[in-house]
Amino acid sequence: FTILLLYFLYQEGESLATAFRRLLRRRIGDHADAYVNLAVRAARASVNSMLIVALFDGLASGAAYAITGVPHPAVWAAVTGLLTLVPFLGFVAVGALTLQLAMTVTATSPVLVFGLGCSILLFGDKVVRPVVAHGGVRLRFVWVLMGCLGGFEVLGLIGLVIGPVVLTLARELWEQRIRGLALAEASDSRSQQAPIRP
């Protein structure tokens, strides 16, 4: 379903985008283009951060697996990288590898592999993802995680991208509302403090 939806959006994307912008301008007003641009930046940042974190986690864990002597490190690195597309699923790959190493007799320490794998995944989620997504999403990690997991729960794989975009738009609307209230309070206090001339 996701692939068919993406194909349809790719085929009809320009006409849908034009009609959507026109509808938003009519309903929202002057801020419509800013919201659409923010959503596009957030979607690009979300996709880029997911892909770059998956590549980083796959390559770094592959190097760690090879150094520690894990059998078939490239396969485990590919599995870890693919699972890190969904937040926290990479830990399932590290846990499965640790269990396999603990059940077989190898020279590789399962505790060392588990520690290195978890450290790499935490670094990818806590450092690499915010650095890559900073310009577009501008959300803290916990909000990106909630957006990804909530979007995945509601919409499946495409929700991993749409969830953070929705939260980014909600944050922008919230900040605009707070700024509007602050300006209204400031203008009210100025009007009350102005001297009354006879």
Image: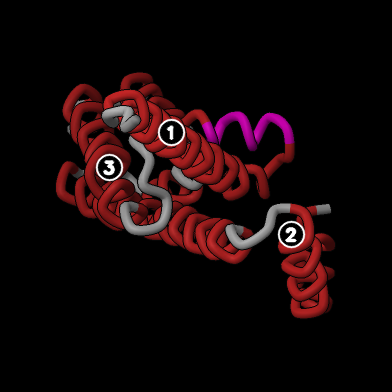
**Residue occupying image coordinates x 78% and y 61%:** 26
Q: Residue at x 17, y 42 (%)?
A: 68
Q: Indicate which label's residue lies in the foreground, 1 or 2.
A: 1
Near-viewer residue (161 or 107): 161
Query: Which mark is in front, 3 or 2?
Result: 2
Residue at x-position 76% and y-position 75%: 18
Looking at the image, residue 31 sits to the left or right of residue 66; the answer is: right
Labelled disc at residue 24:
2
In the rendered structure, the answer to whether residue 54 lies left or right of residue 71 reads right
Taking depth in this image into account, of 146 and 184 the one nearest to the observer is 184
Question: How dense is the environment of label 3, judged by Cα within 10 Å: few (below 14), some, or many (20 and up)?
Answer: many
N-terminal of the two: label 3 or label 2? 2
Which of 110 and 84 lies nearest the eye of the viewer?
A: 84
Of badges 1 and 3, nearer the viewer stands 1
Q: Residue 105, which numbered label?
A: none
Secondary element at image label 3: loop
Membership of 150 in magenta stretch: yes
Q: Is residue 126 above or below residue 189?
A: below
- Look at the image and tell me whether residue 88 can be seen: no
The residue indicated by pointer 3 is 70
Mark 1 lies on residue: 184
Amino acid on which disc 2 is placed: Leu
Where does residue 118 sit, x and y in percent of width and height? 27, 31
State whether the magenta stretch is mostly helix, strand or loop. Answer: helix
| Quarter of the C terminus within the rendering | top left
Q: Position of residue 85 (x, y in %)?
A: 49, 47
Which is nearer the N-term, disc 1 or disc 2? 2
Extent of the magenta region: 147-154
Q: Left or right: 181 with respect to 63? A: right
Q: Image quarter for residue 194?
A: top left
